[in-house]
């Protein structure tokens, strides 16, 4: 996303105009301010989103893992003389802010393990030593275990891949231009007053 800001200097003393020109020639410090403020915007947005986005946990009656909060906390900013950039962790739920994506098994695995019970939510199948595969009457592959009464307890569904739908609401894209303009305005005002 690019943003163009036009600054008209009228009525300013020549010294202030020269100083403003110097500020704008090397925009490294200004871009640092834009990036820092954009990162704060994302983190505030993330606090709100992560506090209510627990569909998977709620559907299983499980305790949320905090994965989304951790993903927002892992967003970083970087800048140079030409740009300010936010670095969003690719291997996180935040990836959906940029479009739908498909998750496939890694490291030679044939299946993804999707939690099917509250007890399994937030854990890996390998953390349960007593799981065994079965095929349900509906044809689904499951990893199950037997409870204390000997009944089958489905713990994980096995799927070859999973598509995560796009979720633009994970990032405050519409707010970035106005935030960048506020950052530039505040930065130039601070520089001219110092």
Image (spheres, helix red, strand yellow):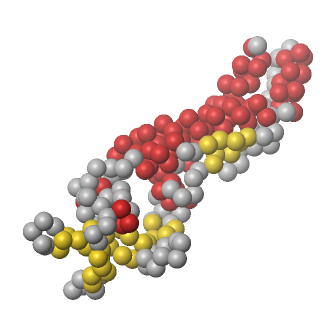
Residue at x 56%, y 35% (from the top left corner): 40
Image quadrant containing the C terminus: top right
Direction from residue 158 to residue 6 in the image, left or right: right
Quarter of the figure with residue 25: top right
Residue 141 percent coordinates (x, y): 31, 80
Residue 115 percent coordinates (x, y): 32, 65
Farthest residue, direction front: 129
Residue at x 44%, y 49% (from the top left corner): 68
Residue 175 percent coordinates (x, y): 55, 42
- Above or below, 179 relative to 69: above
Residue at x 53%, y 72% (from the top left corner): 107
Q: Residue 142 or 11: which is nearer the viewer?
A: 142
Q: Residue 179 or 113: which is nearer the viewer?
A: 113
- Above or below, 115 relative to 1: below
Instruction: Report whether residue 80 is seen.
Output: yes
- Above or below, 173 relative to 38: below
Q: Residue 121 or 58: which is nearer the viewer?
A: 121
Instruction: Report whether residue 58 is seen.
Output: no
Direction from residue 148 to residue 12 in the image, left or right: right
Quarter of the figure with residue 51: top left
């Amino acid at each position: 996303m690019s943003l163009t800001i036009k600054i008209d200097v009228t009525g300013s003393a020549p010294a202030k105009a020269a100083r403003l020109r110097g500020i704008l020639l090397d925009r490294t410090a200004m871009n640092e301010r834009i990036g820092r403020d954009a990162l704060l915007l994302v983190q505030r947005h993330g606090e709100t989103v992560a506090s209510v986005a627990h569909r998977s946990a709620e559907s299983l009656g499980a305790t949320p893992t905090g994965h989304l909060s951790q993903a927002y906390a892992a967003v970083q900013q970087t800048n140079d003389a030409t740009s300010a950039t936010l670095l969003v962790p690719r291997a996180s739920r935040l990836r959906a802010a940029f479009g739908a994506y498909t998750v496939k098994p890694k490291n030679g695995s044939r299946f993804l393990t999707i939690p099917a019970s509250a007890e399994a939510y937030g854990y890996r199948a390998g953390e349960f030593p007593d799981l065994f595969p079965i095929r349900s009457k509906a044809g689904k592959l499951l990893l199950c275990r037997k409870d204390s009464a000997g009944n089958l307890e489905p713990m994980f569904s096995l799927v070859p891949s999973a598509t995560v739908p796009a979720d633009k609401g994970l990032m405050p894209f519409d707010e970035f231009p106005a935030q960048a303009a506020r950052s530039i305005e505040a930065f130039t005002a601070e520089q001219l007053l110092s």
